[in-house]
Amino acid sequence: LVALRDGAARWQLARGIDQWKPGELGEDHFRRRLVEGEVWLASLGEAGPVVGAWELWWEDPGAWGEQPPVAGYVHRLMVDRELAPRGTGRLMLERAERRIAAAGRELCRLDCVAHNPRLREYYVAAGYTVVGEQSAKQGKDGKSYAVTLLEKRL
């Protein structure tokens, strides 16, 4: 997971997308997410390499504030750009939506940094609607940044 995220960060930086940085999240982050929530993997077959992953949270007060339990929140949707077949990101997003609906929740929510219009367009093309902005989401480093809030009714 660390290598997958670092690879995605390097891919972003090579294209001028200032969002993720290599080395930002280590094993401790993913071990904690595995204990506290859900981490899903995409692989090329049962024995194949991992080519993508995403985290599912059942609340996200940092971006969305306190909310009634009507949504699941997708975080860190990431794909290995060298190994993953085209469309893997969309397939993982659809799997997240099915998981959230199966849990009886009606909305899939996510956020992306406000200065990444390409990513926002990707989610809008997948059926998500921009519902607002959070101008001061707190990062792990203590710095705040703006995020665009998107959701999809399931």
Image (spheres, grey):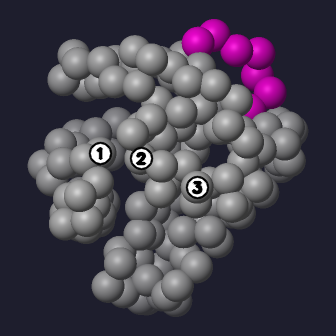
Which badge, 1 or 2, comes first in the chain's sequence?
1
Going by the numbered disc 2, the residue's amino acid type is Asn
Q: Residue at x 42, y 61 (%)?
A: 78
User: Horizontal placement of 49 versus 135: left or right?
Assistant: left
Going by the numbered disc 1, the residue's amino acid type is Gln
Give the magenta range: 65-72
* Mark 2 Cα-neighbour bin, 10 Å: few <14, some 14–19, many ≥20: some
Query: Disc 2 versus disc 3: distance between alpha carbons?
Result: 9 Å
Query: Disc 1 versus disc 2: distance between alpha carbons?
Result: 8 Å
Labelled disc at residue 121: 3
Going by the numbered disc 3, the residue's amino acid type is Glu
Instruction: Name above or below for residue 83 compared with residue 60.
Output: below
> What is the chief secondary structure element of the magenta stretch?
loop
Choose top left, top right, bottom left or bottom right for residue 122.
Answer: bottom right
Q: Circle 3 — which element?
A: helix
Labelled disc at residue 116: 2
Between tags 1 and 2, which lies in front? 2
Q: Circle 1 — which element?
A: loop
Residue 42, visible in the rendered structure: yes
Residue 59, visible in the rendered structure: no
Q: x and y percent of residue 46 in the render?
A: 51, 86
Which badge, 3 or 1, comes first in the chain's sequence?
1
Q: x and y percent of residue 142 in the render?
A: 22, 16
Residue occupying the far left of the picture: 23
Q: x and y percent of residue 123 in the render?
A: 62, 54
Q: Are marks 1 and 2 in contact (CB under 8 Å)?
A: yes
Q: Are marks 2 and 3 in contact (CB under 8 Å)?
A: no
Q: Residue at x 63, y 60 (%)?
A: 93
Q: Is residue 70 magenta?
A: yes
Q: Quadrant of the N terminus?
A: bottom left
Labelled disc at residue 19: 1
Q: Circle 2 — which element?
A: loop
